[in-house]
Image (cartoon, grey):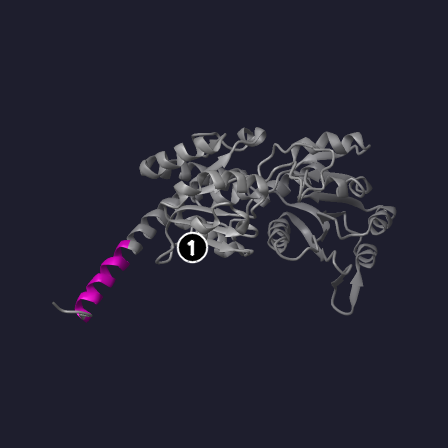
């Protein structure tokens, strides 16, 4: 018996490399064909002859990728884009640094668009409006922070909220221009990618362990323990079955978009489980406004060409068709049944994932959303 035979090791490595390369090549080729079709089927992107001042969220990571996605998607749609930073109320225009008000007065933008707005003084918004400059805010955490956003949202000319159930809430506060604008995905961040060696999993979930998620994962933990799984995020040590799943949990991590996309690509099933609108520990939603709209993870998972198994949200049907380009569940028991089904039925699973990729790439990019926003503010092109 020969141990550590270099020839055998080389042959085994070549065989494994070929198998991995072939699987990646076939999948990426299919995804590229789907993406090209989606791009052809999209309406051409218009361009508005306007100058836009965009103010970032100022929250840093994990909001920074969202700031970047909006900037990269907005720039080709307007004549000129100027960037401001909420955190220190400064940005660099040549030298020295200038305040947001100075930038607005100097450049006279046609609109100032603010992402989230929690770190921007209402006085600054009011003074920019007094210059005759239109202002808009895109609220990205509704309904979970409505106790906070209620204090400043109506200072803007236009309110865009990612939660359909918050539209009437702001209108009841006296805002006349309130529009539903969910988040989306950025193809440069979340896209089909080759899966590295050792990167394949049966099931993936990436996100914080809010209590409603803990409850569900406690019930499905014995099943997950029999599969190849990756769970990543903060607070997962609160699981009742934490020790059972600990080898498959990346604890207390904020995974960047590129790594998240890699895990999505490597999973046969990616679970999406929205946070609860009435979480007693991590909500600023004392009015208990319910949540019906899909989270950005919905679009990011499908944008990777991954099969998505998501909990039901009332407005999801306006974005995807259940059991056609996305699969939903209404209970932990149904989740287990569908995970088992789609792990076995590989071709059905892959077909649904490709349909989800097509729908996402055609309809749910940040370019799509910003075209909607600019059409509201300036009229369609």
| Location of residue 216 with respect to 321 vertically, above or below | below
Residue occupying image coordinates x 47% and y 38%: 219
Q: Residue tagged by mark 1? A: 247
Seen in the image, is 291 located left or right of residue 269?
right
How many numbered dots are placed on residues in this image?
A: 1
Q: Position of residue 125 (x, y in %)?
A: 82, 48
| Location of residue 80 with respect to 373 vertically, above or below | below
Q: Magenta stretch: residue 13 in it?
A: yes
Residue occupying image coordinates x 83% and y 52%: 124
Q: Nearer the viewer, residue 210 or 254?
A: 210
Residue occupying image coordinates x 74% and y 48%: 117
Q: Which stretch did the figure color magenta?
A: 6-19
Helix, strand or loop under label 1: helix
Q: Position of residue 152 (x, y in %)?
A: 80, 43
Q: Nearer the viewer, residue 341 or 114?
A: 341
Q: Nearer the viewer, residue 70 or 174?
A: 174
């Amino acid at each position: 018996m020969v141990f550590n035979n270099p020839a055998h090791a080389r042959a085994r490595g070549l065989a494994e490399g070929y198998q991995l390369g072939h699987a990646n090549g076939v999948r990426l080729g299919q995804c590229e064909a789907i993406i090209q079709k989606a791009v052809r089927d999209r309406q051409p992107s218009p361009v508005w002859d306007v100058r836009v001042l965009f103010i970032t969220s100022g929250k840093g990571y994990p909001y920074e990728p969202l700031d970047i996605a909006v900037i990269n998607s907005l720039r080709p749609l307007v004549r000129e884009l100027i960037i401001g930073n909420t955190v220190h109320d400064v940005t660099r225009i040549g030298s020295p640094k200038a305040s947001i008000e100075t930038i607005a007065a100097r450049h006279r933008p046609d609109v100032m668009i603010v992402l989230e707005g929690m770190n921007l003084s209402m006085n600054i918004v009011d003074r920019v409006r007094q210059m005759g400059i239109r202002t808009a805010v895109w609220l990205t955490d509704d309904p979970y922070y409505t106790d906070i956003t209620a204090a400043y949202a109506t200072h803007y000319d236009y309110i865009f909220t990612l939660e359909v159930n918050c539209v009437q809430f702001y209108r009841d506060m006296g805002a006349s221009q309130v529009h539903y604008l969910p988040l989306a995905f950025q193809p440069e961040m979340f896209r089909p990618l080759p899966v590295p060696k050792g990167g394949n999993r049966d099931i993936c979930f990436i996100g914080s362990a809010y209590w409603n998620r803990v409850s569900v994962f406690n019930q499905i933990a014995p099943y997950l323990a029999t599969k190849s799984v990756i769970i990543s995020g903060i607070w997962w040590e609160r699981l009742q079955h934490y020790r059972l799943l600990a080898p498959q949990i990346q604890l207390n991590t904020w995974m960047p978009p590129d790594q998240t996309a890699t895990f999505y690509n490597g999973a046969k099933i990616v679970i999406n489980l929205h946070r609860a609108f009435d979480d007693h520990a991590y909500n600023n939603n004392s009015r208990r406004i319910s949540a019906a709209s899909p989270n950005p993870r919905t679009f990011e998972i499908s944008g990777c060409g991954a099969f998505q198994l998501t909990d039901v949200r009332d407005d999801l049907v306006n974005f995807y068709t259940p059991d056609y380009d996305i699969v939903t569940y209404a209970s932990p028991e149904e989740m287990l049944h569908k995970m088992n089904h789609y792990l076995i039925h590989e071709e059905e699973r892959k077909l649904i994932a490709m349909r989800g990729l097509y729908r996402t790439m055609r309809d749910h990019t940040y370019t799509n959303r910003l075209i909607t926003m600019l059409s509201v503010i300036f009229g369609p092109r």
